[in-house]
Image (cartoon, rainbow, N blue to C red):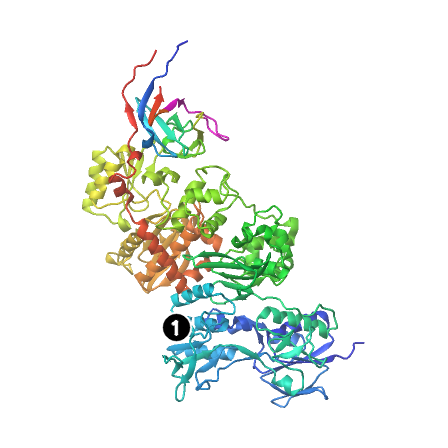
Amino acid sequence: MNIRSTNWIPVGSIHDIPRQGARCVKHGEMTIAIFRTADDRLFALEDRCPHRNGPLSQGIVHDGCVTCPLHNWVISLETGRAQGADEGQTATFPVRLEGDTVLLGL
Amino acid sequence: MTQPKQNLVIVGNGMAPGRMLEHLFELTDRFAVTIFNAEPRENYDRIMLSPVLSGEKTYDDIIIHNAQWYADHGITLHRGEKVVSIDRAARQVVSDKGTVATYDKLVIATGSAPFIIPVPGHDLPGVLAYRDLDDTDAMIAAAEKGGRAVVIGGGLLGLEAAAGLKSRGMEVTVLHLMPNLMERQLDPAAGYLLEKELTGRGIKVRCKANTKAILGSDRVEGVALEDGTVLDASLVVMAVGIRPNTELAKQAGLEVNRGIITDAHMRSSDPDILSVGECVEVGGMVYGLVAPLYDMAKIAAHTLADAQTRGFAHQETPTKLKVTGVNLYSVGDFGEGEGREDIILRDARRGTYKRVILQGDRIVGAVLYGDVTDGGWYNEMLRAGTDISAMRETLIFGQAHQGGGTFDPVAAAAALPDDAEICGCNGICKGQIVQAITDKGLSSLTEVRAHTKASASCGSCSGLVENLMAATLGAAFAKPAQEGICGCTPLGHGDIRRLIKAKALKSIPAVMQELEWATPEGCAKCRPALNYYLIADWPGEYEDDQQSRFINERVHANIQKDGTYSVVPRMWGGLTSVSELRAIADVAEKYDIPTIKVTGGQRIDLLGVRKEDLPAVWSELNDAGMISGAAYAKGLRTVKTCVGKEWCRFGTQDSTGLGVRLEQFLWGAWSPAKLKLAVTGCPRNCAEATCKDIGVICVDSGYQIVYGGAAGLHIQGTTELGSVKTEDEVIEVIGALTQMYREQGYYLERIYKWADRVGYDHIKSVIMDDAGQRRAYYERFVYSQSFAQIDPWAERVAGRFAHEFAPLTTLGKLEAAE
């Protein structure tokens, strides 16, 4: 069993992310979406809907969820799980704030 | 063996005795009826004279009882014979033509005469009253010659006359003695709105105008006012009031004051002589509106048939003005006074004014202008003396917005009296609807609309009609469930739109707070809808909420299945040029755009653009003079055209030029759903205008405007809106239609669905037949466009919303942590 330590990487300022919106972090082949809610909570999810790989970062953010722009799946920002009758899960990443700086845990 | 019939003689053949006979024939057949009618015709609906004057109806449309009806009931009708004397001892009446009739019971229904101000010149030819069909015909004849008309009297009748003459093409001035119009029915605020509306329609209004003399030598030439003003006029209509016709009764020695005095059972001082209608004075009051006159008719019929009634009792009668497009309702007492309180709701932009006057916890009056939906409801509570303290907070928003679990709309509909007006547009009462439902076995709203016309115009009473159906049919009627627009609210789109205006809600949080959203931030369904409603309702005030827009409208490009975007620049009317095509080719080459496709809307789609390249692509397209084609928008998309008469041997008009003009006029407008237009140069329809949201078909004589087509999941041809002669008229009509749709449509509701919902006839009557409303819609559209016509691409090229197009950061290759 590998013991993995989390690398906290500064990716930008919270003010660069719109409330009820998201910005992307490119990480090699992967894109990670950092979401900021209306009440300034942050969440990081792989920018890929479990349904048809839609870019979740482009969706409408509401009540701790994001609605995928392609086919309206609703994904929980906290767990990455599809809500309602849909089934599927997107990878989530730890994210935290230090001052205004957003730290992404990889 | 049948008994010999008694003789019932009626003097007068207006609406009140007509209604009385209907009731009487249901109660008994013991009478042989003789009627003397000073007018040479049958019984017609006098309150519909205004639509006859304005040309919306003909005399035949307003006949209540035709010749057959009189024959069927064995009535002897003496047309054009005026009764000149009553001999009570001999129980006989004598007409001006010498006809003598003997009565057992006599009903005097002589009505009223218009009051003519005795100023010099009042008897000149060309001075008319507005009372009966002869006056109406005389006005129509005068209007055909054109010229100027002066209407003296800014009350109900005067204003209806003014609107009718205006619609017949005359220049009309209304003179009113009092400081505000219809001062007996309206308070100054509503009077002001009405004056503004009429002025907007080109009717001049002069209040505090005291007529001194009517000028002219052998016919009317003008009107002189006390203040020295002289107005030219070829027609003067006096509509300053009525007075009961009582001479006949007076001669017969009956007790007469202002009117013929009767008891509560409509008996005059001679118990064998009854009286009904405007000539009556009962309980110290004289009446001129139809509802109390019909009450009298019913009571008189019962008295004649020796049946019991409670007798006549005064009730407040609501007033409405029968001018198309002016919604006005007033009832009760609205004067200020000790212990009186007002609840007022104003919306200046919409021209809505609602005022409810309370005394203690009871409604004593209501004045509604603009939105009159709840007039009947307030009136019911006024009549019943309902204690409104529990709903005081929400009273002004109307019946639909009464929360409290105890309110049952079906029970409320069931409790309405038969004469409660349900459909204000078409003047349909509850009794008529219930009767149609039961007699004809109607079970759907559509059927009720078809048979009664109730809710067939503006549709605002649809809910009430459904409640009536539920009350009438019980379990047999499955009322379509009222569903909220999403899980966040039980309110439907219509309620939300109405409340946004009524409560002047100007932000998404305000809507969610005031309308009690169940979720803190809404969802992907309701937020874009609210964002649209706020943009449409508060142009220049509401700031577009980017985060409540679907991605395509946020980044002004169409997201594709792989997360790239497509870019469609505008090509006005489908026209392009060498330099535009060159710029498109250059951009495609420079940014490795993999697919270039000609769209169905006559332009070019660049597919597979990376999001981060969007601003650069737009910048280059902007430089070549192109702006966003809004191919993603719930808004104006394209205006397709054919080449028209510039090139085509069949073309009748410059369809391409008109298409370009329309697109330049309409672009940037957000609408409930996408809006696609086409202009075709002849009826061969190469531009496919007849399946568009709005289409224009050029013909030799001008332009046919059609709308409500669909060619998506659902396919349907357009419906004609109307024909116009000039391009300017096309622009005004389409601008007005678009604005009406923008103001009334539900989010994502295409124009054909909106038209299905509110009615094609209604839309046509507003946009084509009512110049005032058309102009108002058009002007609101133009105002809204002044904030909307900003190219979103150029804005973003200049740096706005830059965060949308760049990643937050790009991480270098990380060492995998072991």
**Is residue B68 visible in the rendered structure shown here?**
yes
Q: Which residues are magenta?
A: A81-96
Q: Quick one: quadrant of the C terminus of chain B?
A: top left
- Which residue is pictured at 31% across the width and 43% down the height? B599
Q: Amino acid at mark 1?
A: Gly
Hey, which residue is sitting farthest top in the picture? A1
Element class at badge 1:
loop
Left or right position of A91 against B80: left
Question: Splitting the image into 4 quarters, where does residue B312 fall?
Answer: bottom right
* Quarter of the image where one finds residue B736: bottom left
From the image, tell me which residue sits under label 1.
Answer: B169
Pick the residue in front: B456 or B410. Answer: B410
Query: In the depicted view, which residue is nearer to us: B51 or B281?
Result: B281
Q: Is residue B717 visible?
A: no
Above-or-below relation of B12 to B429: below
Q: Residue at x 27, y 33 (%)?
A: B612
Chief secondary structure of the magenta portion: loop
Find out whether residue B316 is within the magenta segment: no
Based on the picture, tell me whether residue A83 belongs to the magenta stretch.
Answer: yes
The image shows residue B394, relative to residue A41, as above or below, that is: below
User: How would you rate the neighbour count of disc 1 (Cα within 10 Å): few for under 14, some for 14-19, many for 20 or more?
Assistant: some
